[in-house]
Amino acid sequence: MEIAFDREADFYQMSPKQLNIDKVKHKTFVEVNEIGTEAAAATSVIMQNVSGLFSPILMVINRPFFFAITENDSGTILFMGAITNPKN
């Protein structure tokens, strides 16, 4: 896995630009109670263009919404989620 974090890592199948991993975040949730157990996990990887940083995009989230990240060619859903209370 170390090669993914190297400046020479090859992500050309994801983008024609030279990308590097900038940040990786992993969040988990576990609840155990008298009814049972619930667990979830999510990982995000933030990539950056080696030739320069992208300009940030301002996105106002002021209502609930659903989103899905899909693979371009097949349309396969890779990740999906929902924002139910954007004030939190």
Image (tube, rainbow, N blue to C red):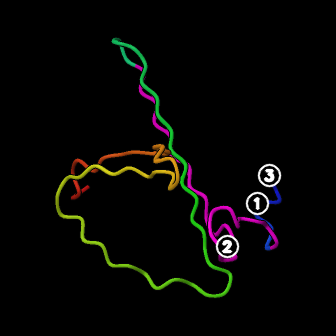
The CA distance from mark 3 to mark 1 is 6 Å
Q: Are circles 3 and 1 on residues that touch, CB within 8 Å?
A: yes
Task: Pick whichever of labels 2 and 1 is earlier in the sequence.
Answer: 1
Q: Which mark is residue 19?
A: 2
From the image, tell me which residue sits under label 3.
1
Residue 16 in picture, x, y percent from top left:
65, 73
- Which residue is located at x 32 percent, y 78 percent? 58
Q: Which residue lies furthest to the front in this view?
A: 73
Residue 30 in picture, x, y percent from top left:
46, 30
Q: In this view, does 38 lie above or below 15?
A: above
Residues drawn in magenta: 8-32
The CA distance from mark 2 to mark 1 is 10 Å
- Which residue is located at x 61 percent, y 65 percent? 23
| Left or right, 55 with reference to 15 | left
The CA distance from mark 2 to mark 3 is 16 Å
Task: Pick whichever of labels 2 and 3 is earlier in the sequence.
Answer: 3
- Which residue is located at x 77 percent, y 66 percent? 10
Q: Residue 4 carries which label?
A: 1
Residue 27 in picture, x, y percent from top left:
51, 46
